[in-house]
Image (cartoon, rainbow, N blue to C red):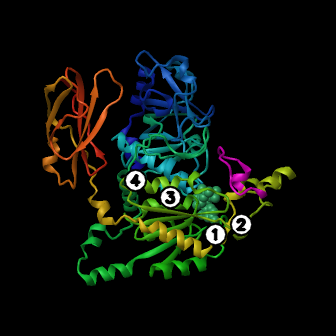
Amino acid sequence: QSQEVSQARIDYHVALQALQEHGTRMVCTGKMHTDRICRFDYLCYCSEAEEFVFFHSNSSVMLPNLGSRRFQPALLDLSSVEDHNTQYFNFLELPAAALKFMPKPVFVPDITLILNRFNPDNLMHVFHDDLLPAYYTMKQYSDLDDEARLVFMEGWGEGPHFDLYRLLSSKQPLLKEQLRNFGKLMCFTKSYVGLSKMTTWYQYGFVQPQGPKANILVSGNEIRQFARALMEKMNITRVEEAEKDGGSTEDEKEKEKKDEYIVVFSRSTTRLILNEAELIMALAQEFQMRVVTVSLEEQSFPSIVQVISGASMLVSMHGAQLITSLFLPRGAAVVELFPFAVNPEQYTPYRTLASLPGMDLHYVSWRNTKEENTVTHPERPWEQGGIAHLEKEEQERIQASKDVPRHLCCRNPEWLFRIYQDTLVDIPSFLEVLREGMKTKPSLKKAKVASTVHPGRVREPRCQTSVQTTNEAKLTVSWQIPWNLKFLKVREVKYEVWIQEQGENTYMPYILPQQNYTFSENIKPFTTYLVWVRCIFNKNLLGPFADVLTCRT
Ligand code: UDP
């Protein structure tokens, strides 16, 4: 039925005429190819040439009009991974008149989002590189709604997690190979090309060793809203936190405690925990909680999310399955295990996620430091950490090394050798790390109260000065509370005052609880001071500075 509807929505001759007369129109956001998303009318795709085509006519628009800079290196990144040279987007140009000599175009009436998935086989990449960016790109452009069509141009098959991509809209996503079915020339009536990188928090080490992105722009709030939307689509209902907190009688609290459980996310083929049963027993005993295991090999993804969304703790070997911690309830703990010779400080996609402001997850890592507890696999293929293909000397060096040195992505054999080890988890040291790490566990209550509202500017900042003697002067600074404070319950309100003698390049900072203060130390007569004032909520929520005051003693 939807087919009929979409056929009715678009009159072929009108569309063809529009394409011939107006050609392609493109308007983009973003100054650089790395932050660009483009919107097109009548962007076409030639499946024979495997190229997108821009048709020029008198009324076509190409903004930015980069000339040949469009190829230096590309118009935009088609995946959310920054500046990856296999993920560039560009188009061929043709005069609209060429249409006369080309196969009749097939028009796609849906509003389309065109992108590359980065690594659809790996669950971490699916979420971090594709689902979150696509979800928020669709939020950015309101016509990319539930009816939008996604087109994946990276050229891979559906992959093991295609059902997750299906959740993004009600229409089946198209793969590059399927575009051939539309004929030799297809034209997207309205399309967006590219993905927002706003939600990504990790860089995989293509130019510098992997680590958190330099400028993270996402908070736990956006991650959780995305998680909630996805859970709704998967028909997962979880006990709302509000309901959970509602239980206030001792009875109810006791019941809640009983319902708490720990999830061990196990891997069944590589990077194994060799004594999983022992680990589970230890966890159950230590925390007096039920422990359940899940694995991607044994459960459906929605059923795993269902379990994780109610858990108090998620324990797992380092690996892509840990991305599911984004479905944990606030206040839960993420416990990540690392094989021998792998430094947890250097591989932090999940720690960074758990630590995003407002994610309110507690993160603990444990590392196997006992070489006798590791099982290596030198004979395996290189991509699973095998090193048999290397020269003898190099193999020996790797075998002897106790710490993988910093390295770039993605084929460092020493890294792969170590990260694909199986581990016998030393229970005493594991529990020790866990106890130590959980000591600082922030209570959920506290995390909830922590407001995310920032102070406004202090109002009516003023200064008054007086000269006491030839070398003594006073400077009184006063201000009014920020306008939004009167609507807020803030635990602690403080003010920061910076005083700088004009022409000097240092300043004196002061933290004050009240709205005025008279400074006399270090204040000289007949001197000009520049004074900045700002408000601070709860120690670390900084407001903006008010306009600088110029105060002459
Ligand atoms: N995987 C799994 N069980 C295993 C090994 C891997 O479910 O025993 C999944 C893993 O979660 C990821 C994909 O297979 O989605 C690729 O795993 P790989 O070890 O290559 O990547 P990593 O987990 O290190 O990111």
Residue beneath label 1, please? 268
1 or 4: tag closer to the N-terminus: 4
Q: Are marks 1 and 2 in contact (CB under 8 Å)?
A: no
The answer to whether mark 1 is within 8 Å of ligand 1 is yes
Residue lying furthest bottom:
251
Name the amino acid, label 1: Ser
The residue under the point 66% across, 73% down is 274
Q: Are marks 3 and 1 in contact (CB under 8 Å)?
A: no
Residue beneath label 4, please? 223
Residue beneath label 3, please? 323
Residue 165 in sight from this viewpoint: no
4 or 2: tag closer to the N-terminus: 4
- Secondary structure beneath label 2: helix
- Secondary structure beneath label 4: helix
User: Is residue 322 left or right of 501 when viewed as pictured?
Assistant: right
How far is disc 3 from disc 4 in space, using C-alphas?
Answer: 11 Å
Callout in the foreground (1, 2) = 2
Q: Is residue 62 above or below residue 486?
A: above
How far is disc 1 from disc 2 in space, using C-alphas?
Answer: 22 Å
Residue beneath label 2, please? 371
Q: Residue 408's spot in the image, x, y percent? A: 65, 43
Name the amino acid, label 4: Ile
Main SS of the magenta part reads loop
How far is disc 2 from disc 3 in space, using C-alphas?
Answer: 28 Å
Who is closer to the viewer here, 495 or 185? 495
How far is disc 4 from disc 2 in space, using C-alphas?
Answer: 37 Å
Residue lying furthest top:
58
Name the amino acid, label 3: Ile
Number of other residues with Cα within 10 Å of mark 1, as a class: few under 14, some 14 to 19, many 20 or more: few
